[in-house]
Image (cartoon, grey):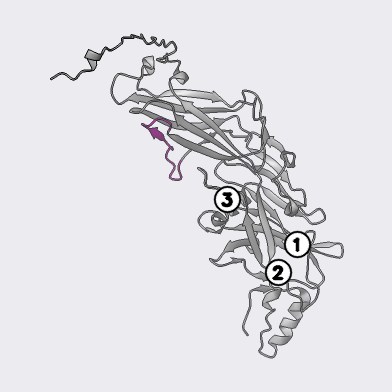
C-alpha cells in the first residue's frame, strides 16, 4: 500500500482505510490543502539585516516562520498548527511556502491563524495562541540585538477561514507581517579633516531592557500601523547582563576606519520597545585618531592612542522606542569630543575700496608710435 504523510481528521482517515483495502490511494484535492502566502512591509537595507521577505525565504538566514492554527470542535479547541513543532514550521521551497505533513480544511470549521518569525525567534521566548481573542502571546522574549521579530494574523473574513462545502475552493492563508521590535541605529560620522585617520572599535550599548512580554490585539491583520508600545509589558534587563556588543558574523569586532571627512558608518540593533529614562542608556566605544601628516591631532596624552568614550542617549526628543519604528542617532566624532581648541575664523574685516578719479585728456587718448 502506498503511504502518504498527510494528517487527516477522523472521518477522512476512515475513508483512507476503506480505500486501501482496494489497493487505491485517495488523495485530497489540491484546493483543500492549507497553504500560506506572505508579505513583509516597510523594509529597507540596514546594518543589521532586516527581516525582509527575501530574508524569511532564505533558509540560511530567516528560515521561514512558525504558524499557530486552530478551530473549535464544540467547546474544544483543536490545534492544527501548534506554533513550535517542525510540523508548524513553514519554509520557502524556491517557488512557494511549504510545510510537512500537509493539513487539510474541514468543511464548516472556522479556522484562525497567527504566525511569527524569523524561525530563530521561536527560541527567544514562549509563544502561545488564544483562539477566542485571536491573539498571539510571547512571554519572556529576549531581544538579542541582531534578530528581529515579525508577527502576522491570517487576514480573511474577520480573521475566520471557513470551507463552505466539499466542492468549495479555499485560498491560501494571507499573512502580512509587522515588525514588533524597535530598530535603533547609531551612525558614527567622521568630523575630522581629510588625511586624519579615525578608528572606532568596541562599540557597546548598556542600560537597555532586553526582555519583555508581547500580546497582539487580535485585529492586526486589519491594521495599517505597527504595534503600540502598550502591547509590550514587563520589560526588564537580562539577569546575566544587559550589554549589546556589536560584532561581525565571524565574531571579530566591527571597526569603523575612515580618512575622509563626513564618512559615516552605522551600528544597528533590533531592540526591545521601551520608555527611555534619563542617563540610563549609554553608548560606549573606543576611539583612536591619527594625523597621517604627523604631529596630531593633539589629544594630549591620548594622541594617537585608544581613548574610551561614553555618550548618554538623550531623552528630550525621543522619549520611547516604539515597535515598528526605526530610530537613527548620529554622532559626529571630532575635536569637540576631546575638548580640543578649534582653529576659528570669527572676526573678518574687509578694507573698503579706495576710489581714485582722474580725467584723461585728448593727448592721453592719442596712440603713441
Of all residues shown, which one is farthest toward the left? 369
Q: Residue at x 38, y 33 (%)?
A: 258
Which quadrant of the structure image shows residue 35? bottom right
Q: Which residue extends farthest right?
A: 74
What predominant SS class does the magenta segment belong to?
Answer: loop
Q: Residue at x 63, y 57 (%)?
A: 39
Give x and y (percent) for residue 88. Answer: 65, 61
N-term mark: 3 or 1: 3
Residue 36 on image: x %, y %: 66, 64
Whole-angstrom CA distance, mark 2 to mark 1, is 10 Å
- Specify which label sits upstream in the sequence, 2 or 3: 3
| Disc on res. 51 | 3
Residue that appears at 36% across and 19% down: 297
Q: Which residue is mark 1?
A: 156
In this view, the residue in front, 329 or 97, is: 329
Segment colored magenta? 248-262
Amino acid at each position: 500500500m502506498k503511504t502518504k504523510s498527510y494528517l487527516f481528521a477522523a472521518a477522512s482517515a476512515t475513508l483512507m482505510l476503506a480505500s486501501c483495502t482496494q489497493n487505491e490511494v485517495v488523495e485530497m484535492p489540491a484546493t483543500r490543502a492549507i497553504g500560506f502566502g506572505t508579505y513583509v512591509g516597510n523594509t529597507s537595507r540596514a546594518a543589521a539585516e532586516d527581516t525582509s521577505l527575501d530574508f524569511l525565504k532564505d533558509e540560511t538566514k530567516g528560515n521561514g516562520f512558525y504558524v499557530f492554527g486552530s478551530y473549535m470542535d464544540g467547546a474544544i479547541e483543536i490545534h492544527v498548527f501548534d506554533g513550535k513543532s517542525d510540523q508548524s514550521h513553514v519554509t520557502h521551497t524556491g517557488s512557494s511556502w511549504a510545510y510537512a505533513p500537509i493539513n487539510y480544511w474541514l468543511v464548516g470549521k472556522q479556522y484562525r491563524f497567527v504566525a511569527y518569525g524569523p524561525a530563530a525567534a521561536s527560541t527567544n521566548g514562549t509563544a502561545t495562541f488564544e483562539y477566542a481573542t485571536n491573539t498571539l502571546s510571547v512571554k519572556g522574549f529576549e531581544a538579542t540585538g541582531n534578530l528581529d521579530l515579525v508577527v502576522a494574523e491570517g487576514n480573511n473574513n474577520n480573521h475566520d477561514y471557513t470551507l463552505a462545502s466539499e466542492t468549495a475552493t479555499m485560498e491560501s492563508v494571507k499573512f502580512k507581517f509587522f515588525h514588533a521590535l524597535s530598530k535603533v541605529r547609531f551612525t558614527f560620522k567622521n568630523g575630522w579633516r581629510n588625511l586624519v585617520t579615525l578608528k572606532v572599535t568596541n562599540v557597546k550599548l548598556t542600560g537597555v531592557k532586553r526582555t519583555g512580554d508581547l500580546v497582539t490585539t487580535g485585529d492586526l491583520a486589519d491594521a495599517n500601523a505597527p504595534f503600540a508600545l502598550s502591547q509590550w509589558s514587563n520589560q526588564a534587563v537580562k539577569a546575566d547582563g544587559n550589554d549589546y556588543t556589536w560584532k561581525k558574523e565571524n565574531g571579530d569586532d566591527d571597526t569603523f576606519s575612515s580618512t575622509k571627512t563626513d564618512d559615516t558608518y552605522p551600528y544597528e540593533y533590533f531592540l526591545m520597545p521601551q520608555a527611555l529614562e534619563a542617563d540610563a542608556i549609554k553608548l560606549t566605544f573606543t576611539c583612536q585618531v591619527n594625523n597621517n601628516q604627523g604631529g596630531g591631532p593633539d589629544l594630549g596624552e591620548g594622541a594617537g592612542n585608544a581613548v574610551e568614550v561614553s555618550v548618554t542617549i538623550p531623552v528630550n526628543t525621543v522619549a520611547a522606542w516604539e515597535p515598528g519604528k526605526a530610530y537613527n542617532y548620529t554622532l559626529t566624532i571630532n575635536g569637540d569630543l576631546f575638548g580640543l581648541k578649534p582653529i576659528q575664523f570669527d572676526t573678518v574685516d574687509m578694507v573698503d575700496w579706495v576710489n581714485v578719479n582722474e580725467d584723461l585728456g585728448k593727448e592721453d587718448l592719442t596712440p603713441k608710435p
